[in-house]
Amino acid sequence: MTEAERILLDLLNIERLEVDLFRGTGSGGETPTRIFGGQVIAQALAAAYRTVDDRLCHSLHAYFIRPGDPSIPVVYQVDRARDGGSFTTRRVVAIQHGKQILNMSASFHVKDEGWSHQHPMPSSESPETHPSRSELRYRYVDQVPEKMKKELLRERPIEVREVDHLDPFRPEISDDQNKIWFRMPGAASTDPRTQHLILAYASDMSLMSSGMRPHGLSWFTGQVNAASLDHALWFHAPVRFENWHLYAMESPWTGQGRSFNRGSIYSEDGVLVATVAQEGLMRRPNGRS
Protein backbone atom coordinates (compact mmCIF):
# COMPACT_ATOMS: atom_id res chain seq x y z
CA MET A 1 0.00 0.00 0.00
CA THR A 2 1.34 3.44 -0.89
CA GLU A 3 1.64 6.25 1.64
CA ALA A 4 -1.08 8.23 -0.19
CA GLU A 5 -3.46 5.26 0.02
CA ARG A 6 -2.74 4.87 3.72
CA ILE A 7 -3.45 8.57 4.30
CA LEU A 8 -6.80 8.29 2.54
CA LEU A 9 -7.82 5.26 4.60
CA ASP A 10 -6.85 7.20 7.73
CA LEU A 11 -9.02 10.12 6.57
CA LEU A 12 -11.98 7.76 6.26
CA ASN A 13 -11.42 6.29 9.72
CA ILE A 14 -13.26 9.04 11.59
CA GLU A 15 -13.23 9.44 15.37
CA ARG A 16 -16.33 8.96 17.52
CA LEU A 17 -16.81 11.84 19.98
CA GLU A 18 -20.25 10.90 21.31
CA VAL A 19 -23.08 8.51 20.39
CA ASP A 20 -23.94 10.26 17.10
CA LEU A 21 -21.12 12.79 16.91
CA PHE A 22 -17.90 12.19 14.96
CA ARG A 23 -14.76 14.05 13.91
CA GLY A 24 -12.75 13.75 10.71
CA THR A 25 -9.43 15.20 9.57
CA GLY A 26 -9.70 18.12 7.15
CA SER A 27 -6.23 18.02 5.57
CA GLY A 28 -4.59 15.41 3.35
CA GLY A 29 -7.07 15.07 0.47
CA GLU A 30 -6.95 16.04 -3.19
CA THR A 31 -6.81 19.82 -2.76
CA PRO A 32 -4.72 22.02 -0.40
CA THR A 33 -6.71 25.29 -0.17
CA ARG A 34 -10.14 23.84 0.61
CA ILE A 35 -11.32 20.38 1.54
CA PHE A 36 -12.00 18.19 -1.49
CA GLY A 37 -15.76 17.68 -1.79
CA GLY A 38 -15.45 13.92 -2.18
CA GLN A 39 -13.58 13.79 1.13
CA VAL A 40 -16.42 15.48 3.04
CA ILE A 41 -18.99 13.22 1.36
CA ALA A 42 -16.99 10.09 2.20
CA GLN A 43 -16.47 11.14 5.82
CA ALA A 44 -20.17 12.01 6.18
CA LEU A 45 -21.05 8.58 4.82
CA ALA A 46 -18.55 7.04 7.25
CA ALA A 47 -20.33 8.82 10.11
CA ALA A 48 -23.70 7.52 8.94
CA TYR A 49 -22.33 3.99 8.58
CA ARG A 50 -21.15 4.09 12.21
CA THR A 51 -24.84 4.24 13.23
CA VAL A 52 -26.11 1.47 10.90
CA ASP A 53 -25.61 -2.22 11.70
CA ASP A 54 -26.82 -4.62 9.06
CA ARG A 55 -27.26 -2.96 5.66
CA LEU A 56 -25.34 -1.11 2.97
CA CYS A 57 -25.92 2.35 1.53
CA HIS A 58 -27.81 2.42 -1.76
CA SER A 59 -28.02 6.21 -2.23
CA LEU A 60 -26.89 9.54 -0.83
CA HIS A 61 -27.77 13.14 -1.60
CA ALA A 62 -25.55 15.99 -0.38
CA TYR A 63 -25.46 19.79 -0.56
CA PHE A 64 -22.20 21.71 -0.29
CA ILE A 65 -22.98 24.84 1.73
CA ARG A 66 -19.59 26.40 2.50
CA PRO A 67 -15.99 25.64 1.49
CA GLY A 68 -14.23 23.31 3.92
CA ASP A 69 -11.17 24.56 5.81
CA PRO A 70 -8.37 21.92 5.61
CA SER A 71 -6.52 23.44 8.58
CA ILE A 72 -9.05 22.17 11.16
CA PRO A 73 -11.11 18.99 11.72
CA VAL A 74 -14.70 18.55 10.57
CA VAL A 75 -17.42 17.55 13.05
CA TYR A 76 -20.19 15.28 11.75
CA GLN A 77 -23.54 15.13 13.54
CA VAL A 78 -25.78 12.19 12.63
CA ASP A 79 -29.58 12.22 12.94
CA ARG A 80 -31.12 8.73 13.02
CA ALA A 81 -34.10 9.70 10.90
CA ARG A 82 -35.58 6.21 10.51
CA ASP A 83 -34.84 2.55 11.15
CA GLY A 84 -37.33 0.52 9.11
CA GLY A 85 -37.75 -3.11 8.24
CA SER A 86 -36.02 -2.76 4.85
CA PHE A 87 -34.63 0.78 4.78
CA THR A 88 -32.62 2.91 7.19
CA THR A 89 -32.31 6.68 6.71
CA ARG A 90 -29.69 8.98 8.16
CA ARG A 91 -29.12 12.73 7.97
CA VAL A 92 -25.59 14.04 8.49
CA VAL A 93 -24.47 17.63 9.04
CA ALA A 94 -20.79 18.53 8.62
CA ILE A 95 -19.70 21.49 10.77
CA GLN A 96 -16.66 23.77 10.88
CA HIS A 97 -16.28 27.09 12.73
CA GLY A 98 -19.77 26.51 14.15
CA LYS A 99 -21.39 26.52 10.70
CA GLN A 100 -22.62 23.86 8.29
CA ILE A 101 -20.33 23.13 5.36
CA LEU A 102 -22.37 20.16 4.07
CA ASN A 103 -25.59 18.34 4.83
CA MET A 104 -26.37 14.90 3.49
CA SER A 105 -29.12 12.32 3.52
CA ALA A 106 -28.23 8.67 3.04
CA SER A 107 -30.42 5.60 2.70
CA PHE A 108 -29.44 2.00 3.51
CA HIS A 109 -31.22 -1.12 2.26
CA VAL A 110 -31.22 -4.78 3.22
CA LYS A 111 -30.09 -7.19 0.52
CA ASP A 112 -33.15 -7.83 -1.62
CA GLU A 113 -34.17 -9.66 -4.80
CA GLY A 114 -35.85 -8.24 -7.92
CA TRP A 115 -35.73 -7.79 -11.69
CA SER A 116 -32.43 -6.68 -13.17
CA HIS A 117 -31.17 -4.80 -16.22
CA GLN A 118 -28.56 -2.14 -17.01
CA HIS A 119 -27.23 -0.06 -19.88
CA PRO A 120 -24.05 -1.52 -21.41
CA MET A 121 -20.68 -0.01 -20.62
CA PRO A 122 -19.45 2.44 -23.29
CA SER A 123 -16.57 1.17 -25.37
CA SER A 124 -13.11 2.33 -24.36
CA GLU A 125 -9.51 1.27 -24.80
CA SER A 126 -7.96 -0.51 -21.83
CA PRO A 127 -6.58 1.74 -19.07
CA GLU A 128 -2.99 0.70 -19.78
CA THR A 129 -3.14 2.46 -23.17
CA HIS A 130 -3.51 5.89 -21.49
CA PRO A 131 -0.91 7.84 -19.50
CA SER A 132 -1.33 8.00 -15.74
CA ARG A 133 -2.31 11.16 -13.91
CA SER A 134 1.23 11.40 -12.54
CA GLU A 135 2.73 11.18 -16.04
CA LEU A 136 0.44 13.94 -17.29
CA ARG A 137 1.26 16.21 -14.37
CA TYR A 138 4.98 15.83 -14.97
CA ARG A 139 4.28 16.80 -18.58
CA TYR A 140 2.79 20.13 -17.47
CA VAL A 141 4.76 20.89 -14.30
CA ASP A 142 6.88 23.59 -15.96
CA GLN A 143 3.73 25.59 -16.70
CA VAL A 144 2.83 26.22 -13.05
CA PRO A 145 4.53 28.61 -10.58
CA GLU A 146 7.41 27.17 -8.58
CA LYS A 147 5.42 27.27 -5.32
CA MET A 148 2.73 25.03 -6.86
CA LYS A 149 4.99 22.35 -8.35
CA LYS A 150 5.34 20.26 -5.19
CA GLU A 151 1.57 20.16 -4.69
CA LEU A 152 0.94 19.32 -8.35
CA LEU A 153 3.33 16.36 -8.21
CA ARG A 154 2.25 15.11 -4.77
CA GLU A 155 1.30 11.44 -4.82
CA ARG A 156 -2.46 10.86 -4.80
CA PRO A 157 -4.30 7.75 -3.57
CA ILE A 158 -6.54 7.27 -6.61
CA GLU A 159 -4.84 6.10 -9.79
CA VAL A 160 -6.42 7.92 -12.76
CA ARG A 161 -6.03 7.46 -16.52
CA GLU A 162 -7.88 9.92 -18.73
CA VAL A 163 -9.47 8.53 -21.88
CA ASP A 164 -10.40 11.92 -23.36
CA HIS A 165 -7.47 14.02 -22.19
CA LEU A 166 -7.31 17.74 -23.00
CA ASP A 167 -4.36 20.06 -22.33
CA PRO A 168 -5.43 21.69 -19.01
CA PHE A 169 -3.64 24.95 -19.84
CA ARG A 170 -4.84 25.23 -23.46
CA PRO A 171 -7.98 23.08 -23.63
CA GLU A 172 -9.59 22.82 -27.04
CA ILE A 173 -13.35 23.16 -27.33
CA SER A 174 -14.64 19.61 -27.20
CA ASP A 175 -17.84 17.68 -26.64
CA ASP A 176 -19.01 17.03 -23.09
CA GLN A 177 -18.25 13.30 -23.16
CA ASN A 178 -15.57 12.65 -20.56
CA LYS A 179 -14.21 9.25 -19.51
CA ILE A 180 -11.54 8.16 -17.06
CA TRP A 181 -10.34 4.84 -15.70
CA PHE A 182 -9.65 4.88 -11.97
CA ARG A 183 -8.85 2.53 -9.07
CA MET A 184 -7.05 2.30 -5.73
CA PRO A 185 -5.03 -0.93 -5.40
CA GLY A 186 -4.79 -0.41 -1.62
CA ALA A 187 -8.57 -0.98 -1.36
CA ALA A 188 -8.00 -4.73 -1.79
CA SER A 189 -8.06 -5.53 1.94
CA THR A 190 -11.05 -3.36 2.86
CA ASP A 191 -14.63 -4.33 3.73
CA PRO A 192 -17.74 -3.42 1.64
CA ARG A 193 -18.44 -0.28 3.68
CA THR A 194 -14.93 1.08 3.20
CA GLN A 195 -15.19 0.25 -0.51
CA HIS A 196 -18.27 2.51 -0.59
CA LEU A 197 -16.36 5.29 1.17
CA ILE A 198 -13.47 5.12 -1.31
CA LEU A 199 -15.83 5.18 -4.28
CA ALA A 200 -17.77 8.09 -2.76
CA TYR A 201 -14.47 9.98 -2.43
CA ALA A 202 -13.46 9.19 -6.03
CA SER A 203 -16.89 9.97 -7.50
CA ASP A 204 -16.18 13.72 -7.16
CA MET A 205 -13.13 13.48 -9.42
CA SER A 206 -13.25 14.90 -12.98
CA LEU A 207 -17.04 15.20 -12.99
CA MET A 208 -17.27 19.00 -13.20
CA SER A 209 -14.66 19.05 -15.97
CA SER A 210 -17.33 17.58 -18.25
CA GLY A 211 -19.27 20.86 -18.28
CA MET A 212 -16.13 22.87 -19.01
CA ARG A 213 -15.12 20.91 -22.11
CA PRO A 214 -17.64 22.47 -24.58
CA HIS A 215 -16.41 25.95 -23.56
CA GLY A 216 -12.64 25.39 -23.77
CA LEU A 217 -12.19 25.80 -20.01
CA SER A 218 -10.35 23.94 -17.28
CA TRP A 219 -9.43 24.38 -13.61
CA PHE A 220 -6.04 25.77 -14.73
CA THR A 221 -7.09 28.45 -17.23
CA GLY A 222 -8.08 31.06 -14.62
CA GLN A 223 -11.22 31.87 -16.62
CA VAL A 224 -13.80 30.09 -14.49
CA ASN A 225 -14.94 30.15 -10.88
CA ALA A 226 -16.15 26.60 -10.19
CA ALA A 227 -17.30 24.65 -7.15
CA SER A 228 -19.60 21.73 -6.44
CA LEU A 229 -23.08 22.69 -5.25
CA ASP A 230 -24.60 19.26 -4.67
CA HIS A 231 -23.79 15.61 -5.23
CA ALA A 232 -25.91 12.49 -5.53
CA LEU A 233 -24.62 8.92 -5.65
CA TRP A 234 -26.44 5.62 -6.12
CA PHE A 235 -24.73 2.28 -5.47
CA HIS A 236 -25.98 -0.55 -7.70
CA ALA A 237 -23.52 -3.45 -7.34
CA PRO A 238 -20.70 -4.55 -5.02
CA VAL A 239 -17.60 -2.37 -5.26
CA ARG A 240 -14.07 -3.77 -5.62
CA PHE A 241 -12.20 -0.54 -6.21
CA GLU A 242 -8.77 -2.17 -6.17
CA ASN A 243 -9.69 -3.07 -9.77
CA TRP A 244 -10.08 -0.67 -12.68
CA HIS A 245 -13.44 1.09 -13.09
CA LEU A 246 -14.59 3.21 -16.04
CA TYR A 247 -16.19 6.54 -15.11
CA ALA A 248 -18.23 7.64 -18.14
CA MET A 249 -19.36 11.26 -17.64
CA GLU A 250 -21.33 13.87 -19.56
CA SER A 251 -22.75 17.34 -19.12
CA PRO A 252 -26.16 17.70 -20.81
CA TRP A 253 -26.60 21.34 -19.72
CA THR A 254 -24.77 24.45 -18.53
CA GLY A 255 -26.36 27.87 -18.00
CA GLN A 256 -27.15 30.64 -15.51
CA GLY A 257 -23.77 30.22 -13.87
CA ARG A 258 -24.28 26.51 -13.20
CA SER A 259 -23.30 23.22 -14.81
CA PHE A 260 -25.12 19.89 -14.54
CA ASN A 261 -22.99 16.76 -14.81
CA ARG A 262 -23.69 13.06 -14.46
CA GLY A 263 -21.71 9.86 -14.71
CA SER A 264 -21.90 6.07 -14.70
CA ILE A 265 -19.23 3.96 -13.00
CA TYR A 266 -18.62 0.49 -14.43
CA SER A 267 -16.36 -2.31 -13.27
CA GLU A 268 -13.80 -3.43 -15.84
CA ASP A 269 -16.00 -6.40 -16.78
CA GLY A 270 -18.93 -4.08 -17.62
CA VAL A 271 -21.12 -4.16 -14.48
CA LEU A 272 -22.80 -0.84 -13.65
CA VAL A 273 -21.56 -0.27 -10.10
CA ALA A 274 -22.81 3.27 -9.40
CA THR A 275 -24.43 6.37 -10.90
CA VAL A 276 -23.53 9.95 -10.00
CA ALA A 277 -25.17 13.35 -10.60
CA GLN A 278 -23.87 16.75 -9.61
CA GLU A 279 -24.60 20.42 -10.20
CA GLY A 280 -21.76 22.88 -9.90
CA LEU A 281 -21.09 26.59 -9.93
CA MET A 282 -19.49 27.59 -13.25
CA ARG A 283 -19.18 31.30 -13.88
CA ARG A 284 -16.64 34.02 -14.57
CA PRO A 285 -14.23 34.84 -11.70
CA ASN A 286 -15.81 38.26 -11.02
CA GLY A 287 -19.18 36.68 -10.15
CA ARG A 288 -20.69 36.81 -6.67
CA SER A 289 -19.80 34.15 -4.10
Image (cartoon, rainbow, N blue to C red):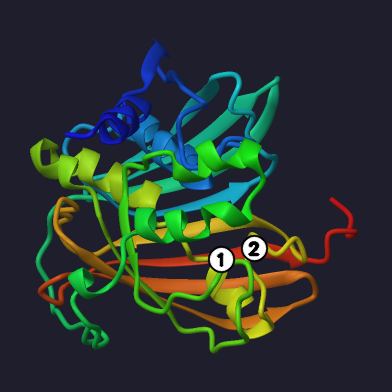
Q: 10 Å neighbourhood of mark 1: few (<14), some, or many (≥20)?
A: many
Q: CA distance from mark 2 to mark 1?
A: 7 Å
Determine the secondary structure under disc 1: loop
Instruction: Measuring from the top left, give residue 112's x and y in whole percent.
Output: 12, 60
Residue 80 seen: yes
Determine the secondary structure under disc 2: strand
Task: Give the residue furthest to the top.
Answer: 17
The residue shown at (40%, 40%) is: 42
Residue named by callout 2: 280
Give the answer, above or below, for where 284 lies relative to 103.
below
Residue named by callout 1: 208
Q: Quadrant of residue 11?
A: top left
The residue shown at (55%, 33%) is: 93
Give the answer, above or below, for where 76 lies relative to 136.
above
Left or right: where does residue 252 sit relative to residue 178?
A: right
Marks 2 and 1 in Cβ contact (< 8 Å): yes
The quarter of the image holding the N terminus is: top left
